[in-house]
Amino acid sequence: MRQDAVRNRRHLVAAARRVFGRDGLDSGVEAVAKQAGVGTGTLYRHFPSKDDLIAALLEDLSDEVLASAQSALDHRDGSGIWEFMQATGAIQADSQGLLGLLWREGRRPERVAAIREIIAELVKDAHRHHTLAAGVSQQDIILILHGLRGVIESAHDGTDEDAWKRYLELATGSLRPRKK
Amino acid sequence: MRQDAVRNRRHLVAAARRVFGRDGLDSGVEAVAKQAGVGTGTLYRHFPSKDDLIAALLEDLSDEVLASAQSALDHRDGSGIWEFMQATGAIQADSQGLLGLLWREGRRPERVAAIREIIAELVKDAHRHHTLAAGVSQQDIILILHGLRGVIESAHDGTDEDAWKRYLELATGSLRPRKK
DNA sequence: ACTCATCCGGAACCGTGACTCCGCTTCCGG
DNA sequence: CCGGAAGCGGAGTCACGGTTCCGGATGAGT
């Protein structure tokens, strides 16, 4: 593969992330191509369809999530679940909420399953070390993460870029075990 | 205005709510017209553009929210804020997350302002009666509501229709004052 | 430097979906 | 009942955006 080709591919995914993140998936492929500094023909050389481009984008993003989940798992002291939620928030915010597509639509189900798997593991570990309130399930964590997505999507056109941090603070307040 | 025209208008708004709620705003106007049992021409007689139809829809929804907000305000015993969040959740769930458009996009800013106004009032009342943890602001409530929207949108294609209730339970856990 | 396989750009194509137009139908006051 | 104004339906128009195509440019091995 030629050097300029790999460079263009990278640029295209980055451009897609920027454009789709800013203006939504309804943005034209032409906007993405222009942002990447190439023509639409080039875009279609690398990705057979717009949907494939989006899939590549999500592949990238979910790689990041999986990586952070793995590193959170390494803790094994019950703090992993908190770290994971923070990291997910950061990635979600950085990608302007695009990561939510992975959840919301049926895209890349294996990835979603893998992430769920790890969350279950993190929850189990947290319970083992009593860093999570009793009765909180993996499903509850996922609920909070869906909420996190909603918050980030809303702040999107707004002013407060770090609102999601405050949100996590609030939302996780009731997940921590009762400090007596 | 002729009777059948009034009826058709109502049917159109209801149909739009159903169709757009189920399949998203990208659904064609033809689907809405068919659902309402009329032709597209009729739709365009009542609403000059698709966007106007959506605006009418949101008008309806925000009417419901304002009404529930008003009735929550009547309590004046500090419980209004909780009732309001429950009611908003119910409306949001019923409309399949369409209500979120009011928030997310810049649509109908006066309505949004009015709702914010009432939330501020509810928060003030709650603090007066100490039914809300100190340091929780109107902005925090809105964050939780954004999260609520995210949860409902996600459950959308899923199985668990009542997930948002559990979410509210979790999310509001840390908003209540420390029961000592 | 030469060559050719690979890659690039963007004009042209085509399907989709918002919107218009107009002949026909239906309501309703007299 | 009758007349005509208001309303209806849906085929046709048009613009937009995803996709294709191909002549020209460009990288890389000899």
Image (spheres, coloured by chain):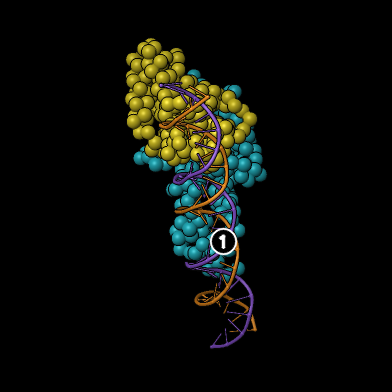
Chain colours: A yellow, B cyan, C orange, D purple
Circle 1 residues within 10 Å: few <14, some 14–19, many ≥20: some
Q: Is residue A59 visible?
A: yes
Residue lying at 37% horizontally and 19% vertically, measured from the top left: A122
Q: Which residue is mark 1?
A: B44
Vertical relation: A107 (above or below) C1: below
Give the x, y percent position of residue B103.
Answer: 57, 40
Task: Pick the residue in front: A29 or A107.
Answer: A29
Residue lying at 44% horizontally and 13% vertically, measured from the top left: A180
Residue lying at 41% horizontally and 24% vertically, measured from the top left: A63
Residue lying at 56% horizontally and 61% vertically, measured from the top left: B44
Q: Amino acid at mark 1?
A: Tyr
Vertical relation: B98 (above or below) B2: above
Task: Pick the residue in front: C10 or B180.
Answer: C10
Vertical relation: B27 (above or below) A165: below
* Residue A62 relative to residue B128: left or right: left
Give the x, y percent position of residue A124.
Answer: 33, 19
Q: Is residue A147 visible?
A: no
* Chain on which label 1 sits: B
Task: Pick the residue in front: B85 or B47.
Answer: B47
* Residue B136 relative to residue B96: left or right: right
Task: Pick the residue in front: C18 or A164.
Answer: C18
Give the x, y percent position of residue A66.
Answer: 40, 22
